[in-house]
């Protein structure tokens, strides 16, 4: 993992997207310093309110984890302890960090269960008595119970049906607004990120390959990997479409290829890509890309003419994206206008014609 630099502000949601095996969960574990013992972080800093988590002692770290910074692990709904009730597990998380009695801890658990929509009447339930969606809400409650400043959620909606998925996304948005916490939302599903994230990071081969405000990234994806990810997202409203997929798989992160980690799969790769790692560069304000073909210029436009064959089809790809990915575009548009329009049949038809 290299060149991974980003900030998360209070009340901001940063979405990290990449396909399976790109190293997203390992990044989360690195931020939390929960990597297995054999994994070594050679350099870098993880600053939370100015304190470097990678440099602090275990006791200080324990004080922060679960309190100031918390984590909803991948498949967390299956990770609740089966032999304790939901109330006991939530209360335990309070007692580990706050100097309160058990009664007060249970009161906090009850309030949070109400807030996440499970209901306090489930305090005495065991995890197996809850549905998958309810268990996921409990896992989120567990991460929030000590009012953290930053929450890292790893695939919080994977394995849930689309209705429950939408409910969980609404819940996260409400919680963010109410508690003003920063969130890092990790997922392989770009539509999840389109719904919620303010900033999107595209992660590949243990590197950030593109980073931009969400609306900008969906409108103007510049990295060939980002474009391929967006193209692989089917538009359920289109009449007919040719499915696009990206052949191959992400590199072995223990032995990545030289040069650009995407070069074995990139349709635009040229000699330089096989030897030189592209650095992440700001190509327009707030829009960062790591690709030899994408070069920034001072007035904020991305210039794509650096490749060996003159103007490359990357730009056309971007325009095409804009017409194809209705669901993603709507997610971006909602955030752009700060509201959630309900689009009727006529508006949808108009969108299709654009
Ligand atoms: N920096 C690294 N160095 C060596 N191996 C790594 C590194 N980062 C991740 N790996 C290994 O690569 C594999 C995939 O990583 P990880 O589980 O983090 O991917 P992921 O993007 O979360 O995948 P999924 O979407 O399937 O959950 C794991 O076996 C992990 O141990
Ligand atoms: S640097 Fe080269 S291989 Fe990597 S994404 Fe850009 S064009 Fe493709
Ligand atoms: Mg993962």
Image: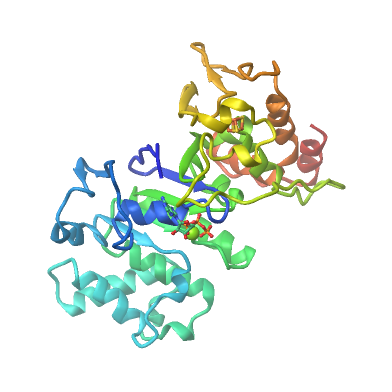
114 w.r.t. 221: above or below? below
**In this picture, residue 143 sits left or right of residue 100:** right
**Residue at position x 74%, y 32% from top?**
320
**Residue at position x 53%, y 75% from top?**
132
**In this picture, residue 10 sits left or right of residue 266:** left
Q: Which of the pair 55/216 is nearer the observer? A: 55
Q: Quadrant of ligand 2?
A: top right
212 w.r.t. 82: above or below? above
Q: Residue 122, how many percent across, how many down?
A: 41, 81
Q: Residue 16, how many percent across, how many down?
A: 48, 47
Q: Which of the pair 86/33 is nearer the observer? A: 33
Q: What sort of colour scheme is used for the picture?
A: rainbow
Farthest residue, direction right: 240
| Residue 54 visible in this rendered orientation of the protein | yes
| Residue 105 occupies quadrant | bottom left
**Residue at position x 16%, y 51% from top?**
56
Quadrant assignment for the N terminus: top left
Q: Which of the pair 339/336 is nearer the observer? A: 336
């Amino acid at each position: 993992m290299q060149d991974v630099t980003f900030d998360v502000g209070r009340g901001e949601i940063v979405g990290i997207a990449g396909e399976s095996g790109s190293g997203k969960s390992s990044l989360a574990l690195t931020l939390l310093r929960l990597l297995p013992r054999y994994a070594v972080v050679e350099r870098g800093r993880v600053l939370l309110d100015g304190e470097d988590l990678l440099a602090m002692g275990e006791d200080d770290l324990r004080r922060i984890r679960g309190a100031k910074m918390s984590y909803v692990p991948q498949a967390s709904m299956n990770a609740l302890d089966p032999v304790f009730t939901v109330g006991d597990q939530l209360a335990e998380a309070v007692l580990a960090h706050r100097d309160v009695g058990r009664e007060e801890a249970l009161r906090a658990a009850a309030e949070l269960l109400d807030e996440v929509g499970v209901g306090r009447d489930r305090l005495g339930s065991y995890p197996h008595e809850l549905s998958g969606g309810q268990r996921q809400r409990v896992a989120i409650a567990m991460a929030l119970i000590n009012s953290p400043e930053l929450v890292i959620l790893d695939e919080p909606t994977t394995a849930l049906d689309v209705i429950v998925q939408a409910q969980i996304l609404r819940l996260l948005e409400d919680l963010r607004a109410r508690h003003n916490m920063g969130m890092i939302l990790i997922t392989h599903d770009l539509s999840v990120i389109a719904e919620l994230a303010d900033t999107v990071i595209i992660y590949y081969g243990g590197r950030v390959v593109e980073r931009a405000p969400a609306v900008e990234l969906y409108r103007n994806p510049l990295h060939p990997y980002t474009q391929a990810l967006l193209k692989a997202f089917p538009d359920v409203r289109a009449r007919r479409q040719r499915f696009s997929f990206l052949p191959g798989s992400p590199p072995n992160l223990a032995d990545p290829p030289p040069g650009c980690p995407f070069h074995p799969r990139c349709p635009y790769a040229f000699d330089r890509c096989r030897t030189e790692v592209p650095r992440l560069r700001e190509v327009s304000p707030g829009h960062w890309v790591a690709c030899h073909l994408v070069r920034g210029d001072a007035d904020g436009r991305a210039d794509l003419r650096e490749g060996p064959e003159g103007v490359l089809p990357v730009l056309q790809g971007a325009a095409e994206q804009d017409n194809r990915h209705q669901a993603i575009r709507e997610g971006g548009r909602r955030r752009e206008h700060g509201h959630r329009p309900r689009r009727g049949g006529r508006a949808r038809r108009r969108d299709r014609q654009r």
